[in-house]
Image (tube, rainbow, N blue to C red):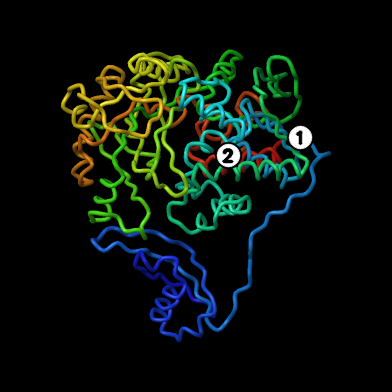
């Protein structure tokens, strides 16, 4: 007999098999000896009251032993199958490749950057020397932006595809099975490179290809149908289907499409700063304590406020995290955040951004939002003084309009410079943040403090350009066989939703090519 039930555990009981069985026995009113096994279906932290607890949805096996149903996806060999070109080796591209193999198609993945191991050297140069390799950085390279900027797997894309299958594939390639049950699953930047490498090996072992240092510089289009791509300005690769999964920072791809008169559209995005607090402040506020229990993970938060009909919100919150320099071109400042799997750094950071609408940027140019974004990043670079030193300001000083006498110690390795962030942010962004931050402080005790630093600019929360596609076929309305995919096309946000979109595009290739 099987029964599903919700139970609660004290933090120190989480992970303790005997404690969990004791609670199950009492809740189900059966002898503990009759509970042969159990399976945790979902786990979350409930910190709404002063006593913080874990809530678990559990399936108990009473008087029966469960059948082990471990998920293992087996892939056939597609070496001699019809091939599909996939531009970009981020989560969308890699999961599109896996799905192509499952569908009996051969994926050829073209990545402008380097493999995950080689990327490490370029990231070290960014952090230590302020040197940006425009083809290998936090955004470009195997695994995409998510590989070295956290690996959060939380998504609301429940209706877009099979989230559970995506998570199972991550587990099959090395992630812990905790991600299958945790309400806010997270892998960690330190673990993701090994998982991405394992996914690549699966693709290669099945007869697919993954090629690095392969920058797509042109699309081959004949009679309104894609015929292939040009790589590095010279090599022609032909195919009847091209999945374009280039991510939200590949500005050259948007410019290429526009130059070839292939329809692209301006898209709203969000702009702001990354805010970092001592993690202890967030822990105290969320867990109602002076010192966080060793049995609880570093706390996170999610905040939103409407300011004069404009949304201001936190996103990509990184408990125990680090602020990272994510520029893709020289002389620009872009910041993001990430956490290791243990989330054991002393700081908590989060993007805190303001909605930017099409009405905020004058003109009809479909790339105007991208140009607006880039101009702000260049201003931030100049304000920081070069070498990826980022402009910063203490929170209360920002709201009250004064230059900070000094800046708190923080996790941004290239360094921060005390400035007036008003000089780099558009007035409507500055004013919206200025009004929202004290309100956030009323929602989260201790949040509004001069111990927090604002670091600019957080500008790559989503793509400022949309590449349109048909809702049924997933193909571009003007170019048959071209499949705009995931974040770079404006249809996803985050690792899991991008992976799902990659799967959907691969299935569309099978149906409509």
Q: Is residue 4 above or below residue 147?
A: below
Tell me: 307 left or right of 223: left
Crowd around label 1: few <14 · some 14–19 · many ≥20 (10 Å): many
Mark 2 and mark 1 in contact? Answer it, CB < 8 Å.
Answer: no
CA separation in Å, label 2 and label 1 = 19 Å
Q: Circle 2 sits in a helix, a strand or a loop, which is it? A: helix
Q: Quadrant of the N terminus?
A: bottom right
Please give the name of the residue rendered at 65% of the width and 24% of the height, measured from the top-left corner. 479
Q: Which mark is residue 91?
A: 2
Image coords of residue 395 (percent x, y): 23, 32
Say which of marks 2 and 1 sits in front.
2
> Residue 6 shows which numbered tag?
none
The residue singled out by tag 1 in the image is 83
Image spot of residue 409 (x, y percent): 30, 33
Q: Nearer the viewer, residue 250 or 257?
A: 250
Q: Earlier in the sequence, mark 2 or mark 1?
A: 1
Q: Does 289 sit left or right of 369 as displayed?
A: left
Residue 46 screen position, x and y as percent: 32, 60
What residue appears at the point 63 percent right and 50 percent down from the top-left corner? 173
In the displayed structure, would residue 409 be above or below residue 403?
below
Q: Quadrant location of the C terminus? A: top right
Quarter location, residue 275: top left
Q: Nearer the viewer, residue 187 or 408?
A: 408
| Quarter of image, res 112 | top right
Describe residue 294's horizontal placement relative to residue 187 as left or right: left
Farthest-out residue, right? 80
Dot 2 alpha-carbon crowd within 10 angstroms: few under 14, some 14 to 19, many 20 or more? many
Q: Residue at x 62, y 36 (%)?
A: 93
x, y percent for residue 413: 40, 29
């Amino acid at each position: 007999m099987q029964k599903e039930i919700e139970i609660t555990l004290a933090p120190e009981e989480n992970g303790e098999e005997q404690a969990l069985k004791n609670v199950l026995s009492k809740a189900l009113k059966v002898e503990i000896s009759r509970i042969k096994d159990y399976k945790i279906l979902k786990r979350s932290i409930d910190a709404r009251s002063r006593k913080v607890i874990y809530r678990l949805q559990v399936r108990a096996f009473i008087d029966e032993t469960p059948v082990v149903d471990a998920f293992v996806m087996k892939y056939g060999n597609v070496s001699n199958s019809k091939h599909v070109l996939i531009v970009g080796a981020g989560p969308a591209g890699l999961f599109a490749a896996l799905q192509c193999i499952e569908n009996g198609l051969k994926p050829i993945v073209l990545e402008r950057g380097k493999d995950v191991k080689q990327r490490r050297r370029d990231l070290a140069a960014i952090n230590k020397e302020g040197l940006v390799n425009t083809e290998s950085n936090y955004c470009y390279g195997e695994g995409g932006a998510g590989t070295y900027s956290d690996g959060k797997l939380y998504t609301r894309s429940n209706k877009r595809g099979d989230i559970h299958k995506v998570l199972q594939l991550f587990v099959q390639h090395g992630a812990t099975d905790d991600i299958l049950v945790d309400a806010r699953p997270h892998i960690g930047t330190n673990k993701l490179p090994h998982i991405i490498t394992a996914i690549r090996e699966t693709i290669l072992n099945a007869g697919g290809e993954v090629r690095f240092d392969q920058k797509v510089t042109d699309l081959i289009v004949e009679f309104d149908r894609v015929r292939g791509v040009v790589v590095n300005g010279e090599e022609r690769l032909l195919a009847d289907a091209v999945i374009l999964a280039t991510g939200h920072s590949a500005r050259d791809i948007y410019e290429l499409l526009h130059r070839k008169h292939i329809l692209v559209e301006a898209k709203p995005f969000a702009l702001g700063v990354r805010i970092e607090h001592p993690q202890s402040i967030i822990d105290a506020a969320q867990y109602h304590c002076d010192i966080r229990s060793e049995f609880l993970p570093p706390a996170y938060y999610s905040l939103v406020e409407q300011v004069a009909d404009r949304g201001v919100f936190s996103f990509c919150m990184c408990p125990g995290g680090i602020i990272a320099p994510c520029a893709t071109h020289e002389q620009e400042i872009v910041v993001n955040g990430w956490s290791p799997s243990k989330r054991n750094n002393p700081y908590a950071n989060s993007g805190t951004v303001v909605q930017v609408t099409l009405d905020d940027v004058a003109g009809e140019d479909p790339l105007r939002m991208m140009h607006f974004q880039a101009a702000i990043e260049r201003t931030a670079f100049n304000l920081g003084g070069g070498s990826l030193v980022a402009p910063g300001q203490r929170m209360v000083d920002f709201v009250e309009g004064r230059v900070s006498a000094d800046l708190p110690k923080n996790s941004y390795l290239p360094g921060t410079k005390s400035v007036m962030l008003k000089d780099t942010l558009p007035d409507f962004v500055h004013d919206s943040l200025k009004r929202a931050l004290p309100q956030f402080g009323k929602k989260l005790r201790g949040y509004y403090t001069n111990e927090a630093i604002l670091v600019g600019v957080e500008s790559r929360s989503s793509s400022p350009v949309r590449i349109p596609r048909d809702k049924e076929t997933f193909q571009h309305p003007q170019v048959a066989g071209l499949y705009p995919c995931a974040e770079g096309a404006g249809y996803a946000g985050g690792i899991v939703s991008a992976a799902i979109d990659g799967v959907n595009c691969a299935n569309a290739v099978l149906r409509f090519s």
